[in-house]
Each structure stands twice: as structure tokens, then as C-alpha cells.
Amino acid sequence: MNNLKQAKSALISVFSKDGLEPIVKKLDELGVTIYSTGGTEKFIKDLGIEVVPVEDVTSYPSILGGRVKTLHPKVFGGILNRQDHEGDAAELEKYEIPQLDIVIVDLYPFEKTVASGASEQDIIEKIDIGGISLIRAAAKNYKDVLCVSSMEDYDETLSILVNQNGQTSLEDRRRFAAKAFNISSHYDSAIFNYFNQTEKLEAFKVSEHKGQTLRYGENPHQKGYFYGNLDQMFDKLHGKELSYNNLLDVDAAVNLIGEFKNDEPTFAILKHNNACGVATRKTIHQAYVDALAGDPVSAFGGILIANTEIDKATAAEIHNLFCEVVIAPSYTNEALEVLKGKKNRIILVQKDINLPNSSVRSCLNGVLVQEKDLKTDTKEDLSYETNNKPSEKELDDLLFASKICKHTKSNTIVLAKNQQLCASGTGQTSRVDALRQAIEKAASFKFDLHGAAMASDAFFPFPDCVEIAHKAGISTVIQPGGSIKDQLSIDYCNENNVAMVFTGTRHFKH
């Protein structure tokens, strides 16, 4: 440990006083002179500890409704002076500026205020000016000043004061400076993104405070990290830690089941970001049984998700399958007892929160940002292109297939019947290949495709797909339309009594 500095003075000005008391008492015990403002000054006085009001240093009161309290050369000079610089030392003496060795400051809760739905006036008042300036100044001068910028660092601060008898090392101060600039950059990003909701400047700023190191990335030789707050999304009730691949699959599962949020009990099973089983039924137990029937082979090691509570009967069926993760909005106590029977099985309770409306992914030497595909095809969107029109039951199957298709890797074809996924062709370079893959897979699991529905994520450039589908027994088709050769597919359907509807919306998922 090198370059130890004994703290002789501290400036404390915080919005939240939680956890501050032990630090203040320790500073007083060490004989540190404490300077403070407003509510923090009163808090310290109420502890029976002597404190110097900043107004006594600056000869200015808090003005403009508290907007200006610490913005003064006698405060910032005390922070920014270089203690090994003769000129700085002389100016401090000349202008009667007190040396400040520790700065403990937090910021107004801007993000919480925005999240609360407060008025713009209240939000603007929570843009911190003095606090952010103090943090930046103290962190810049870390060679001489310890900057404590968050209550999350109070325990470590107290430990340093106690174990080092009020001395701070250069390593301590530099580490805290890094934390401080993390706080300040995050804060400024949040403010910018608030304003940019309406201004739409072409700038990309993302900041996440919470991060965790994963066991590895997609493969064991790759490092992996997650930045975000999973606790906002889920309550984890059981099992091992989520891996990089788990998280990608969980994301896909959450987005897919969101399409069925207000539907009857629906269960989905996903593998490698794609659904291998989905069913909607009167009970969640039957929905799981029929979802599993869609592809019991791929379901091994998959991600399971339900749109309603999982009961004991469903849990007992799930327990017979090796699966990585089970997700539901709730579980009965009896179901949890069964599911916890395998120690590594991850059990998550999904919370009802709003997810971001944009998606971000790395690309080349930059990032791609887009609005999420939030369009769900409905009956009102459909145009009926063929002489034969689908029945209400067939329409339900078409829209069911369309929901799944939207969340399956392109090029894709999805086959469904009686609100059950029969098969899909995923991630193919040819739409014909995707269809043939789906038909072959459905046959391998003994699905009768007569009367089934087919969904395509994009238009058919030729009539070959509707011909292949018809010969396999499929009687209804849903697709975006938009090909210059749409009429060829329409003509084939008319000649062979196939009902086809257009949505007008493509759902590529690359």
C-alpha cells in the first residue's frame, strides 16, 4: 500500500442518509473536520456531532430554491487543489480555502423519479448539478481525494476508515474514482435518454450498473457477462446460476410467451431460441402434455415457460423431463416441492414488467439498434385472398401459428393444428427447405397434417410452397403477401380449395 494520506477534512452532502451514520461517527472519532449542507448538515447535528456549514466557508447561503449550494470556488478549490503543488497550496492559503480530503456525495434520484411517472417539472428538478460536479471534481483529483459517490460504497468506506485509521491509499482513491465516473456517466446517459425519447438524436447510449460474470459464453473457451437487473425480471427460487446460453433462451421464451399473455393456458418449450413445442389448452397440464408432444426429442435440456400458474400435476409431468429452466408467473407449493426435486433445475417466477421497446446487437465495429417487432397479427389485419375462406377454428390456428412464426429464426415455416405446434422449419436458407423440414418433422412425430395451418414469416416468391403444403394435407395458409408473383400462389390455392390469408406484415427474425 503506497501514497497513504491521512484524512483531516470531509465534505458530506447526500440525498439519502441511509447507512451514513457509522461513517459520520467514525470521522468524528478520528478528528476529521466535517463540512456539510442543508438536510445532511441537520442530520449530522442531530447525531450530536460538530459540523461546519458550507455557507460559513463560502459566505453564501443556499439560493435559488436549493439549486445552488456548493457551486463555489472555496468548495471546488478545496477539492481540486494539488497537494504537492506549491502554487496551489499558496492559493488555498491566500483565499482561505479549506483542504477537502474526502467527498461523500450522492445524486438526486433521477431514474426513480422518471419511473414513478412524475411530471416533467419534478423530473427536471431531479437533475443534479452540484452533486455531479462535486463527484467529477473529487474523482478527477483522486491522487489527493477519496470520492464516495454511492451509498453502496459506504461499507467499504467505513472499513477503510476503521482498518487504516483514517488513511486512504492511492489504490483506494483510484478505485473509488472509477466507481464515481461509473456513477456520473450512467447518470448523464439516463438524462440524455429521457430527453431523447422525443428529440430522437442519432446517438446510442446504454448504461447498466448491475453486471455479473457468467460461467462462460456460448462455449467454455469464451468469457461471458450479463449486464442488467435480472431481479427486476424474475424471482429465482431454485437451481444453479443462469448461463449465457440459458439467458438467450430465456429471453426467447419470455418474448414468445408474451404473445399468449392474455390467452387460455399456454405452454411453450424452446431449444436454441426456437420453439419446439407450443400448445394452448383448457388447463396448463394439458397444454404442457401437448407442447411436449410437438417434439419430445428436442425438449430434452430445453427451456419451459407457461403463461399461467403451474400446478402439481403439471410439475409431475415436467419432472420426468430433463430441462434447464422452468418459468411461470407462479407455482403452487406442491408444484414447487416436485420441481425442486432436481437440484440444478432453475425455477424462475416471471414478474410482470415492461421490457424495452428496442433491441440492440453488436455488428462489425458498431451496434445495430431497431424497434422490436411488437406487431401481433390479428383477424382485423387479414385480407382474404382466395375463394375459399378459413373457418373461425382455422383462423384461430392460423393466428396461433403466426405468433410462433414471428419468434422463430428465418427462414421459417410453422405448422399448427388445434392450437398445437406440429413442427417448424427454422433458420433455413430456402423457404422450400424450411417447409420440407417442417413436414418431415411433423411426420416423424405422427402428426396428421390434414386440415393443418401453415404460417410463413415472409412471402412466397413462387407457388411451390403452397403446392408442397397442399399435397401434405395442409388446408390453410397465412403469409405477409407482397411478392410480384403472389397471384401464382393464389391461383394454386383457388384451384385446390386451399384458404390463404395475407397479413401485410413480414416477421423476419435473423
Image: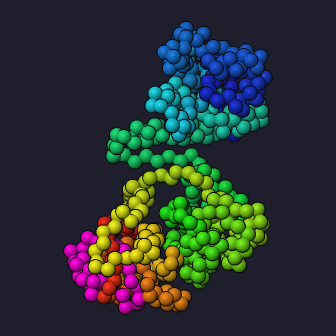
Q: Is residue 483 magenta?
A: yes
**167 on left or right of 62:** right
- Quadrant for the N terminus in the image: top right
* Residue 307 visible in the snapshot: yes
User: Looking at the image, how many numbered discs can be counted on the residues?
Assistant: 0
- The percent position of residue 469, horizontal first and vertical second, equals 37, 86
Residue located at (77% from left, 33% from top): 162
For the residue pair 51 and 354, the one nearer the viewer reads as 354
Question: Looking at the picture, does residue 351 appear above or below residue 416?
Answer: above
Q: Which residues are magenta?
A: 470-495
- The residue sitting at 34% across, 40% down in the picture is 199
Please check the rendered image and state whether residue 172 is part of the magenta-colored stretch, yes or no: no
Q: Quadrant of residue 148?
A: top right
Query: Can residue 124 be seen from the camera position used here?
Result: no
- Look at 34% across and 43% down and name the residue there: 200
- 168 over 484 or under it: above or below: above
Q: Residue furthest left?
A: 484
Residue 206 versus residue 333: which sits nearer the camera? 333
